């Protein structure tokens, strides 16, 4: 399979020709700076500076050195939390893909009116606070919650089972929150596929399953990559949902960092945890980009 | 490969109660190049989609050879198709695109490669096997699409305005090339186009469609010289139209009044049944004679030259008919000698041989 390589090379060439577009298409430097300055200032003061301080503190608090990192690497608990965080993020990403892809496919193939309706249903949860949605899961999964009540009443179980404050609950609730971030890019990718390509494949002898496997799936890969990257990275740093529906046994990095800053007030160690999480995230983004660069037109999402 | 006949019998198709194809029957012969010609909305593309299997007729029967394919799945029809926008798979190379129908039919690797190479040679794209579609020009992409549609040797090839996205020069080159390949492979072609010149140059027969109905079917020269209705007369080639009134017979000839002062006589065969019937008279620009008019001598139609345009082999002379304000006739005169025959403002007479006239009664449609 040398095809992806070729696509990658081609995408690179197309991008190069785009950046060398005639100057009348570009704003003068002064105007460009003016347009992006407010955001740059906000990011500078509100993001780069505090994050930089936090990361810096990991080397200087309580005293200069790598003590914070040594502590992190030498304590199995923290490494377990890191591994669990990556695992949960992968699980959420996979679940989002499995649940989201069929929805995106259906949306792209529906009539316009119905498609808009489904789109609204997908977007609706995004307009609701993650806090509310997480509490909703508590209502459903708690000891005397909806699921347990139904199972007890129907006689499937005789004792309430533990659903809430488990890793499963965290993955379930986070998937619920993040699945739109999978559906939207996949929908966009499938929508961009020329309908004639499907007709052409059918005309050339492909059945419906083959059309999916040979045409729709490969051509929606850019959307899949984008969706996976977004859900994975969002899941890595997710705070609210795991803090609410997760228990001590399903502690994740974000929650751990939260504890260090608000409860133990160990800013140096919180900084070290943040640095590690940031590095892991960046590493994974780079890996994704590497994979992405083999596919055309998507390097801009990562 | 041998072409097979395509038979359309009494096809009806409507979308949401709007009839787009009405009672169309066409018998395409094996190995024939048949064009479906018509303006947009004439139902020609819908007809093609029904042969390909992407639409199902509400009534009627479609068969290829002896096979009834009316309700057959598109992938079981063995009917090749070339799309307007090429529809090449962007994630596959040229060779992979062309090999696609062979893979679907489970050809062996070696034979598939041989066939792909042969097809690449046929469309003159040797050396492009490993390119991606985006790296080719429009004309090259359409040749790949043609190769892909033909590689599995279907008995029938459908083409949906395949050249309309290309520029004029390339279009003409590809018209000749498509014709050459079609003759060599003896495949039956159903070719959809709205370009009458393209249809005239390429087709063995043309089926002219308008508003979902088949207006006339015949060889290009037939449609040009013997149109059976005003729509075809106006759609194929350039035609001058004038309203007239049938006055009756006189000495074995039919008399038609064109204007207050001008009447013409013609063979009785052109005459409608009722005296007083309104009709449309049509005449080709090359059948008109234009002569200078001196004083009040008037024969034929009196007119004033609006413009005389030199276009190479002929002069096109636009003449405003004096008794029909707003009506302008186009005449094509041989440009022999090179001298400008008329200038704007010249007063002229337009005359013609009666047998060059075509008369249509009660036509509801008429192309420009």
Image: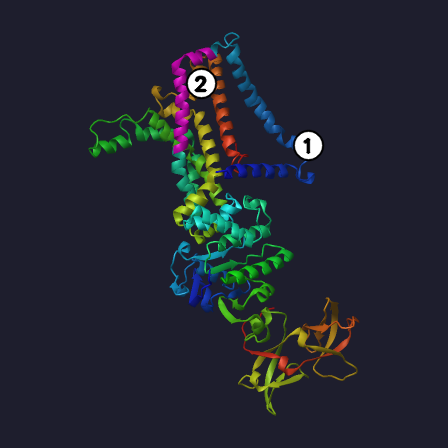
> What is the quadrant of residue A91 in the picture?
top left
Residue A100 highlighted magenta (yes or no): no
Q: Residue at x 63, y 32 (%)?
A: A35
The one of A88 and B222 positioned closer to us in this rendering:
B222
Q: Which residue is mark 1?
A: A29
The one of A249 and B115 positioned closer to us in this rendering:
B115
Q: Is residue B16 above or below residue A188?
A: below
Q: Is residue B172 above or below residue A113?
A: below
Q: Which residue is mark 2?
A: A257
Q: Position of residue A286 (x, y in %)?
A: 51, 27
Residue B178 visible in the shown view = yes
Q: Disc 2 and disc 1: Cα gap in Å?
A: 40 Å
The one of B292 and A162 positioned closer to us in this rendering:
B292
Residue B40 visible in the shown view = no
Label pair 2/1, CB-CB below 8 angstroms: no
N-terminal of the pair, mark 2 or mark 1, is 1
Q: Position of residue A153 (x, y in %)?
A: 21, 33
| Pointers 2 and 1 within a single chain | yes
**Magenta: predominant secondary structure element?**
helix
Q: Position of residue B107 (x, y in %)?
A: 42, 49
For the record, the magenta segment spans A69-94
Q: Position of residue B39 (x, y in %)?
A: 55, 64
Residue A82 highlighted magenta (yes or no): yes
């Amino acid at each position: 399979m040398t095809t992806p390589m070729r696509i990658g090379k081609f995408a690179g060439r197309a991008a190069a020709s785009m950046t060398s577009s005639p100057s009348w298409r570009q704003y003068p430097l002064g105007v460009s700076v003016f347009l992006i300055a407010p955001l740059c200032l906000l990011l500078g003061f509100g993001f780069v500076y505090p994050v930089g301080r936090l990361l810096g503190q990991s080397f200087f608090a309580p005293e200069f050195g790598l003590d914070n990192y040594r502590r992190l690497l030498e304590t199995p608990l923290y490494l377990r939390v890191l591994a669990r965080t990556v695992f949960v993020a992968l699980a959420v990403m996979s679940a989002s893909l499995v649940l989201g892809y069929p929805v995106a496919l259906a949306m792209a193939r529906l009539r316009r009116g119905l498609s808009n309706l489904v789109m609204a249903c997908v977007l609706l949860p995004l307009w609701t606070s993650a806090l509310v949605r997480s509490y909703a899961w508590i209502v459903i999964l708690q000891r005397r919650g909806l699921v347990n009540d139904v199972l007890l009443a129907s006689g499937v179980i005789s004792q309430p089972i533990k659903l809430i404050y488990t890793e499963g609950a965290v993955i379930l609730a986070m998937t619920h929150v993040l699945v739109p971030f999978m559906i939207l890019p996949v929908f966009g990718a499938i929508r961009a596929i020329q309908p004639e390509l499907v007709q052409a494949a059918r005309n050339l002898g492909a059945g419906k399953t083959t059309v999916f496997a040979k045409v729709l799936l490969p051509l929606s890969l850019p959307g899949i990559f984008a969706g996976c990257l977004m859900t994975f990275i969002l899941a890595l740093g997710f705070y609210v949902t795991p803090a609410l529906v997760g228990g001590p046994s399903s502690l994740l990095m974000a929650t751990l960092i939260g504890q260090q800053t608000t409860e133990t007030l160990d800013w140096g160690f919180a900084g070290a945890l943040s640095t590690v999480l940031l590095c892991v995230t960046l590493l994974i983004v780079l890996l994704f980009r590497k994979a992405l660069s083999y596919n055309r037109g998507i390097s801009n999402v990562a | 490969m041998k072409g097979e006949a395509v038979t359309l019998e009494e096809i009806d198709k409507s979308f949401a109660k709007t009839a787009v194809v009405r009672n169309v029957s066409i018998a395409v012969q094996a190995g024939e190049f048949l064009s479906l010609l018509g303006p947009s909305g004439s139902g020609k593309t819908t007809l093609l989609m029904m042969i390909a299997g992407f639409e199902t007729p509400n009534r009627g029967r479609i068969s290829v050879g002896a096979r009834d394919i009316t309700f057959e799945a598109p992938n079981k029809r063995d009917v090749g198709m070339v799309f307007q926008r090429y529809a090449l798979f962007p994630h596959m190379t040229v060779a992979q695109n062309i090999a696609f129908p062979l893979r679907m039919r489970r050809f062996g690797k070696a034979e598939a490669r041989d066939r792909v190479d042969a097809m690449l040679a046929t469309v003159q794209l040797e050396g492009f096997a490993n390119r991606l579609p985006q790296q080719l020009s429009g004309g090259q992409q359409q040749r790949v699409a043609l190769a892909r549609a033909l590689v599995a040797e279907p008995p029938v090839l459908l083409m949906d305005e395949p050249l309309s996205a290309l520029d004029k020069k390339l279009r003409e080159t590809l018209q000749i090339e498509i014709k050459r390949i079609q003759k060599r492979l003896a495949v039956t072609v159903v070719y959809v186009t709205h370009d009458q010149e393209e249809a005239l140059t390429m087709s063995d027969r043309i089926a002219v469609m308008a508003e979902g109905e088949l207006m006339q079917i015949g060889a290009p020269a037939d449609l040009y010289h013997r149109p059976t209705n005003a729509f075809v007369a106006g759609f194929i080639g350039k035609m001058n139209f004038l309203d007239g009134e049938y006055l009756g017979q006189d000495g074995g000839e039919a008399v038609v009044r064109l204007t207050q002062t001008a009447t013409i006589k013609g063979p009785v065969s052109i005459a409608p049944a009722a005296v007083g019937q309104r009709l449309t008279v049509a005449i080709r620009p090359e059948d008109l004679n234009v002569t200078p008019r001196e004083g009040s001598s008037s024969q034929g139609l009196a007119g004033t030259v609006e413009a005389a345009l030199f276009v190479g082999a002929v002069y096109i002379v636009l003449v405003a008919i004096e008794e029909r304000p707003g009506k302008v006739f186009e005449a094509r005169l041989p440009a022999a000698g090179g001298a400008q025959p008329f200038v704007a403002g010249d007063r002229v007479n337009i005359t013609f041989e009666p047998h060059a006239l075509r008369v249509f009664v009660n036509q509801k449609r008429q192309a420009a």
